Amino acid sequence: MRLWETGTGKPLGSPLSGQVRAVAFTPDGRRMLLGWASGSARLWEVPEPTRGDPERLRLWAQVVTGMELDDSGGVRVLNVKTWQERYQRLGK
């Protein structure tokens, strides 16, 4: 998977691994379309940037990127269930 800047069409960062194969953002940046290796796709609302305590900011970053840091400092892609749970927590 690779993230692309919609305004310039240039890739953002290195390709990412995981079951998500494509991500596209709407021009206003409020929604993103995720496509999986299975051929399915889903449209998600992107949460507004947030301010707050470090735990809330960490949660926001995980929801926006769909990733988290593991204990060794590596990056792990969140599975759909985990992402949905964190998205729900962020809305509270």
Image (cartoon, grey):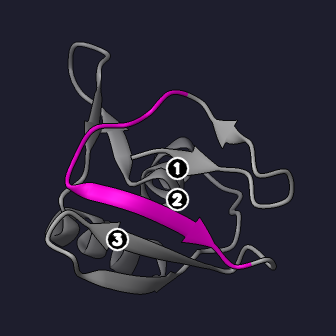
Q: Kindly report the distance in space between the C-alpha atoms of the residues bearing marks 2 and 3.
A: 16 Å
Q: CA distance from mark 2 to mark 1?
A: 5 Å
Locate residue 87 relative to residue 57 in the image: left or right.
left
- What is the three-letter code of the residue carrying label 3? Gly
* Quadrant location, the C terminus: bottom left
Residue at position x 18%, y 59% in the image: 79
Segment colored magenta: 14-26
Categorize mark 1 by other alpha carbons within 10 Å: few (<14), some (14-19), many (20+): some
Q: Which residue is denoted by mark 3 in the rendering?
A: 35
Q: Going 20% across and 68% down the picture, which residue do you hit?
A: 80
Q: Quadrant of residue 42?
A: bottom left
Which dot, 2 or 3, sits closer to the camera? 3
C-beta proximity under 8 Å, tags 2 and 1: yes
Q: Amino acid at mark 1?
A: Ala
Whether tag 1 and tag 3 are in contact, CB under 8 A, the answer is: no
Q: Which mark is residue 61?
A: 1
